[in-house]
Image: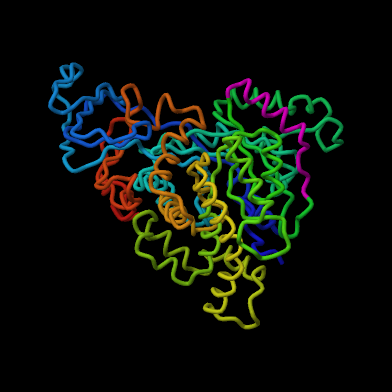
Amino acid sequence: MNANPLGQGYMHVPPRTNRLAWLLLLWSSGAGWCCPSAAAHDLRIEHVTIVSAERTNPLRNASVSVHGDRIIGISNANVANASDTTLAAAQIIDGRGLYLVSGLIDSHVHLGYIPGMTAEQELKHPEIARAARAQIPRSYLYFGFTTLIDLVSTPGEMARWNNHAIVPDSYFCGAAGLIDGYPMNFLPKSSRYKDMPYFLVEPGAGLGVPPADAAAHSPEAVVARMKADGAICVKTFFERGFGAQRDLPVPKLETIRALVRAAHAAGLPVLLHANTAEAQTFGLDAGVDIIAHGLWHWNEPSAATELTPAVKAILDRVVDAKVGWQPTIQVLVGERDLFSSSFLSDPILARVLPPSLIDWYGTQEGQWFHDFLVPLMRPPANADATALDATVVAEYAVPIGRVERATGYLAKHRARLLFGTDTPSGPIYANPPGLNGWLEMQRLTGAGVTPTQIFQAATLSNAQALGLDKDIGTVQVGRRANLLLLRDDPTQTIQAYANIAKVILRGRVIDPSELVATRFSP
């Protein structure tokens, strides 16, 4: 058994029933591109310290003026701002002792379903599901994520996600997976071609699509369709499989090079699902822009976690090519936490998950995926919960150690780290929306990434990598007013994100108390 049989992306175990296949259909889609525009509103934040990734030093005692959803003025608080003459009725916030920063960007999420709940279970428990779906957008905002990038979505799923009273700005990538490869292999053939419409067909592949349709699935045609549908990026995959399916088809190098050329011609960056040494080498050879996962499978037989010369060579290429790199360490930790006997009793969950959902997770029905995975862990015979926990911790120690060391190496060498969580990384409840980002920050810190690097990765670097930096990612005149008021400087400590004073979404000021899951009973 591999050191981590599950750590392969956002679904790690092949389905055994149609129920799982249907759930995977929901996981393979995300949603939304931006929240509804609010009515014009004027806001002024005075005597605040601005911390923004494009600035070398904080701007202290500043006054920031917002009209509608845009920043229209930044000045020293002691100097009149000409734009303020139009803001006579503005809402005023005294920013003394606070830090104003750009809202955070999670560049790797999946928004189309309730973590850990199948479609059948959602229908069976409509009240629990309703409370969960209403809360999920708020939970991202509670931890400061005002922008989300769903890496595998369609326009229909985006429309569903946007049908909330309050929702972060959200964008999507189209999923250009090889036909019948990952992640399409998990879906029934009766629906996979419709529900993952941007799949690739390689010339002469002889696969089960009508010849007349093959031309519509060339790299050029697929990118054109994504662009027309509103995608801002392209997600592709190099995944040979796991569990019982280890021989999945993977794309040819020339296919992904053609995809990259077509995407760049359309102004879209290309992300590659890749967590193995082979896959990341493939992505670098293909010229992708972003590697969507850390390097935790090294294609080496030993259980060593110290960087080998071969792994260092890959990481050096990442640095030299300035390729974006999403560590997603919390993917592995979240999978491990599914087996933790104490996870559901952590009081922080009550901030981001409705009480009814937490209670349901603790039921036998809510433990369905945990029970499905237990045999794969190969626990000792008649193992109790403590023994099972120990077995799982040992199983995940190697891949977690590897990705931590790879991340630390890249941080030390000033690689282009991007903040993404892969929330949720699978059909598990241990990747709670919003909270998962805060947990990822803790993993990054433990791996050697500095608070300044985390702040950069979650703001300007993410915005630049996805072509959004003219709109978000910094506190500048003309940028969208997606902002956070913090009690601490986030370039000095990640604790700044643990107690956010105010969230500002498109110019609307939101108190965190409005976002917690316990604000009302479902």
Q: Position of residue 134 (x, y in %)?
A: 40, 46
Please report the bounds of the magenta region as a residue range: 248-267
Please identify the quadrant where the C terminus is shown.
bottom left
Which residue is rendered at x = 24% and y = 47% of the image? 487
Main secondary-structure element of the magenta-colored stretch? helix
Question: Which quarter of the rendered picture does the N terminus lie within?
Answer: bottom right
Residue 118 occupies quadrant? bottom right
Would residue 433 be found to the left or right of residue 17 on screen?
Answer: left
Measured from the top left, where is residue 324 in percent x and y? 55, 38
**Could you tell me residue 283's position as x and y percent?**
68, 39
Residue at (35% x, 25% y) in the render: 479
Which residue is rendered at x = 38% and y = 38% of the image? 146
Q: Nearer the viewer, residue 407 or 197?
A: 407
Nearer the observer, 99 or 503: 99
Residue 108 among those drawn in magenta: no
Q: Residue at x 60, y 68 (%)?
A: 371
Q: Can I make out residue 373 in this image?
A: yes
Choose between 151 and 460: the one closer to the eye.
460
